[in-house]
Image (cartoon, rainbow, N blue to C red):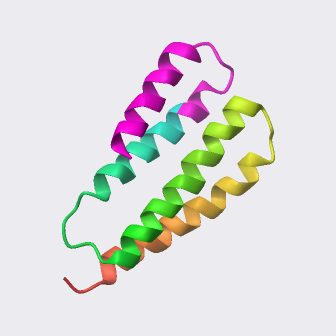
Amino acid sequence: MAAAAAALGAFGAHALGAHPRIETWHTASHYHLLHAIALCVPGLPVWTRRLLLGGTVVFAGSLYLLVLTGQGWFGAITPVGGAVLIVGWVLAATSKP
């Protein structure tokens, strides 16, 4: 997941540098990389990992698709991924080690 975040971040920087939605791409790759690193934390419960992974795929993925396709409805999916990420973080904070 971290390798994909790095590759997609580099793609955006080099191939999409002047794209009008480049900041959206940066947001996607930033959240993608942060959550890839979070998944490396030892001791995270399985459901926390699943929520962080799924939330990242939906959040960052919808933003990547929004930029690549120009289809605005992908932006409507992004908050769902964000909500899943929030639930994952709350679960991580409240779970017993």
| Magenta residues, dominant SS class | helix
Where residue 41 appears, x then y in whole percent?
Answer: 22, 62
Comparing 38 with 2, the one in front is 2
Q: Position of residue 34 (x, y in %)?
A: 36, 48
In this rendering, would 78 be left or right of 60?
right
Q: Is residue 90 above or below residue 34?
A: below
Query: Is residue 82 placed above or below 31 in the rendered structure?
Result: below
18 part of magenta stretch: yes
**From the viewer's perspective, is 92 left or right of 20?**
left
Side of 80 where 34 appears, left or right:
left
Is the C terminus in the top left, top right, bottom left or bottom right quadrant? Answer: bottom left
Q: Position of residue 58 (x, y in %)?
A: 59, 55
Q: How many marks?
A: 0
- Seen at 69% across and 30% down, the residue is 68
In the rendered image, residue 9 lying in the magenta stretch gets the answer yes
Q: Which residues are magenta?
A: 1-25
Q: Residue at x 34, y 43 (%)?
A: 2
Whether residue 89 is situated above or below residue 36 in the rendered picture = below
Q: Which residue occupies 51% across, 32% down?
A: 26
Q: Residue 1: x percent and y percent?
A: 38, 47
Q: Quadrant for residue 24, please give it.
A: top right
